[in-house]
Image (cartoon, rainbow, N blue to C red):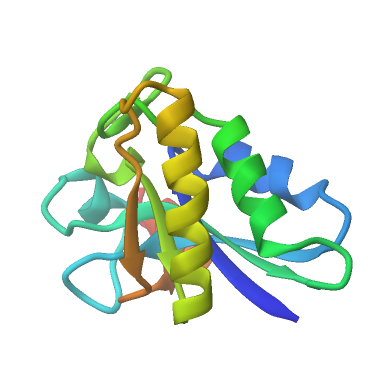
Amino acid sequence: MEIAVLACGCFWGPEIKFGKLEGVYKTEVGYCGGNTPKTTYREVCTGNTNHAEVVKLEFNPEKISYEKILEFFFEIHDPTTLNSQGPDFGTQYRSEIFYLNNSQKEIAKNILEKKNIKLSGKVVTKISLLSNYCTAEEYHQKYLEKN
């Protein structure tokens, strides 16, 4: 099994879409790329943590390649809108690929370059080393309990 971590707007819709792909065995919503290793929904919504809402995928590369996952990533959101997707606005809704190793980094760069040519240089998707990932499930539960 391999892992992919992708930010493409609010994580609930993309989690459902990625979860339907053959070869994806587990999905998890969370936050990544921020200033701290743990955060809460409320903190992320302030725009001060620098976390993106992400979907973490566990997939079998013999059933679906990382390349196919990234191609699907670009199909299910608009990679030309900075810090927004549909009605959601804020840095947590940015388009970003978080890589775990150099192989993923190179694959992401190649796919992004092809997509950027196709979209006349308008792609704003970032490619970053995975950092400060934390799951949102437990933090959402704590947030809901307090409110």
Determine the image quadrant of residue 24. Answer: bottom right
* 49 over 46 or under it: above or below: below
Q: Residue at x 39, y 18 (%)?
A: 87
* 75 over 135 or under it: above or below: above
Q: Residue at x 23, y 65 (%)?
A: 34
| Residue 135 visible (yes or no) | no
* 11 over 67 or under it: above or below: above
Q: Residue at x 58, y 43 (%)?
A: 73
| Residue 41 visible (yes or no) | yes
Apparent side of residue 55 relative to residue 8 in the rendered image (left or right): right
Q: Residue at x 42, y 30 (%)?
A: 117
Between 51 and 68, the one lying in front of the other is: 68
Q: Which quarter of the rendering shows the N terminus? A: bottom right
Between 27 and 126, the one lying in front of the other is: 126
* 23 over 16 or under it: above or below: below
Between 139 and 27, the one lying in front of the other is: 27
Between 18 and 38, the one lying in front of the other is: 18
Q: Where's residue 138, x and y in %?
A: 49, 68
Q: Where's residue 94, x and y in %?
A: 32, 41
Apparent side of residue 64 relative to residue 66 in the rendered image (left or right): right
Q: Where's residue 114, x and y in %?
A: 49, 39
Q: Where's residue 69, x and y in %?
A: 67, 53
